[in-house]
Image: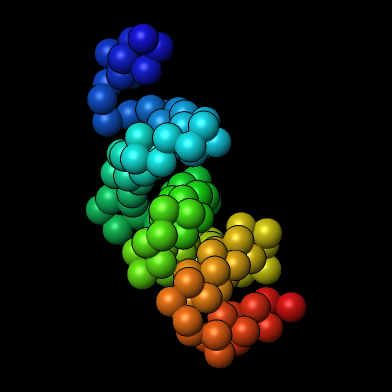
Amino acid sequence: GTLRSLRRALGPGDRRVGVLLYRLAAVHRDRGEYRIAEQMYREALALLRPVDGAAATPHYGAVLNHLGALLCEMGQPTAAQEVSQEARLVFAACGRASSWHYGVAVHNMAVAALQVGRFVQAESLCSSFQ
């Protein structure tokens, strides 16, 4: 379909394909198709990952945020916390430590902490962003 055509036209490693995959993954997540969404988020991350010392972009952080939330929904709190911590670091490095996206990363980390019974950590995370 369209994704296949876009990959052919732009090349399989084009970052715009990564952005499209990120958006399509959200559709699959909304449909409850979590495995497909996870695969698309991970593929988008591979395409958007910074290379050769380049700084991570907010797009990369946003995909990490969405993947972190999905992993929480899938009952994978440890993986969710790792991905969400990376998102938080990306937004801090981009100078967006007070942004909504940074807050989402912290929220995802708190949800993951709750899922594994780390209540003090979850509370600490929540109070750190007030």
Q: Residue furthest right?
A: 130
Q: Quadrant of residue 111?
A: bottom right
Residue 60 shown left or right of residue 46 in the figure: right
Q: Does the image show residue 61?
A: no
Name the residue located 46 percent from the left edge and 59 percent from the top edge: 72
Quarter holding the N terminus is: top left
Above or below: residue 46 compared with residue 128: above
Tell me residue 112's x, y (percent).
Answer: 48, 69
Quarter holding the C terminus is: bottom right
Above or below: residue 89 compared with residue 120: above
Name the residue located 63 percent from the left edge and 65 percent from the top edge: 103
Q: Does the image show residue 38?
A: yes
Q: Nearer the viewer, residue 82 or 45?
A: 82
Tell me residue 26's x, y (percent).
Answer: 51, 36
Q: Quadrant of residue 55?
A: bottom left
Name the residue located 36 percent from the left edge and 69 percent from the top edge: 78
Q: How many marks?
A: 0
Above or below: residue 62 compared with residue 89: above
Tell me residue 28's x, y (percent).
Answer: 46, 32
Tell me residue 71's x, y (percent).
Answer: 42, 55
Q: Nearer the viewer, residue 59 or 39?
A: 39
User: What colouring style does the render use?
Assistant: rainbow
Name the residue located 56 percent from the left edge and 80 percent from the top edge: 122
